[in-house]
Amino acid sequence: MVEAAESTIEFYQIFEISSDSNSVRKIDLDDADANDVLVFVKKLANDARYGASQRQATFLDNSAVKNNLINSLIDKKDKSSISKIAEHLLSCEVEYNSKHGNFNEIRKGSLLVSNFENKGENYILIAKIDVENFFETEHLKLLKGLPLDKGVYKTCLVNVNVNELGQEIYLSDTNSTISKFWWNTFLECEFIRDSQLNTDLAFSQLSSTLSQVNKVSPVDHAYLKGNLTSYFTTATHFNPDEMIERVVGNYEPESKEVNTDKIKDDLKKTCSKGKFDTSFEIDITPIKSKLKRTIKIDDDIELKIKSGDVSKIYHFEHQKNNFIAIKAKSGYGNFKKLDVSDD
């Protein structure tokens, strides 16, 4: 066992999975630096737990991966159960490629399985990592390896309590969506939250985060909330980075007291709290009523905004009176024209 700054690594195994040759090869790690492995494992685990494309799930009872993980915990000296997980992945890839290979073949890669402890919590990480070619700088040899920073990988993080697996698992994918092959075919699990629940939770909590702006500047809040509403009504798949860019982006506030960098950080923190998944198909069915906004003008008039977009609505003063102007394509012929030219 290797220790490093509140972290320990119990075991790690890497397998080369090749559906082309229908083979699994366990990679010799005798010369590996366990501390370097621990750093790599913790990075993947952090992405699984807090990444921009993360979902919580639970194993089905008949999951081969789940049952082999349990067996590996019962007999910690016998790691044949880990090899069975690699063999299971191979069989899933071979079957998948035989049906879909001409259109969407699964790339050759490596399977990493590791048991480690971090800050008093015990975890098992399973990761499928696409192998990349690179030049070794000293001798300029073409080698294959696991990418550290911008690699393509899928992960599954499982909490371990003594010799039992936790009820919930965390899934991530460097692609914008969690691969169905990964969560359904290989891991055999189901998501805890469906698209409607995720949409409802995300919209409500992100709206609550933006409500802090309303205390400082209602006009800036109206624009930002409108951008959030527009994102949920036009985007098909939720992505935190894309959402933050659409909501805040390069927006220049009307009030100097509004800090857009802080708003971006607050929205990012809301996404990382784990109260909703950060990768899901948007379904606005449960939030349709929340998307509409009604603003009282006076006792007889209310302004209803269906999409949240307030970019066509303006406020101005004329002869010491406050007015609302709406850029309109139709309907304006029903009202008297106001002369706002200088007297």
Image: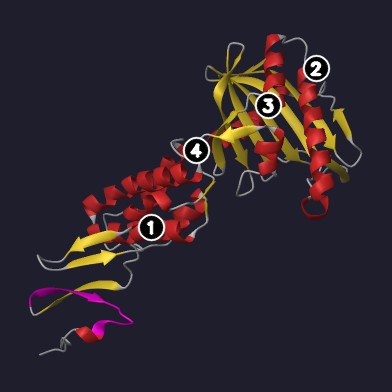
Secondary structure category for the residue under label 3: loop
**Sequence-first tag of 2 and 3:** 3
> On residue 63, which mark appears?
3
| Range of magenta residues | 320-332
> On residue 180, which mark appears?
none
222 inside magenta stretch: no
In the rendered image, which residue does mark 1 sit on?
A: 229
Secondary structure category for the residue under label 1: helix
**Sequence-first tag of 2 and 1:** 2
In the rendered image, which residue does mark 2 sit on?
A: 80
Give the amino acid type for the residue marked by disc 3 in the picture.
Answer: Ser
**Sequence-first tag of 4 and 1:** 4
323 inside magenta stretch: yes
Give the amino acid type for the residue marked by disc 1 in the picture.
Answer: Thr
Secondary structure category for the residue under label 2: helix
Q: CA separation, marks 3 and 1?
A: 39 Å
Q: CA separation, marks 4 and 1?
A: 21 Å
Classed neighbour count for the residue bearing mark 3: other residues with Cα under 10 Å, few (<14), some (14–19), many (≥20): some
> On residue 193, which mark appears?
4
The quadrant of the image that shows the C terminus is bottom left
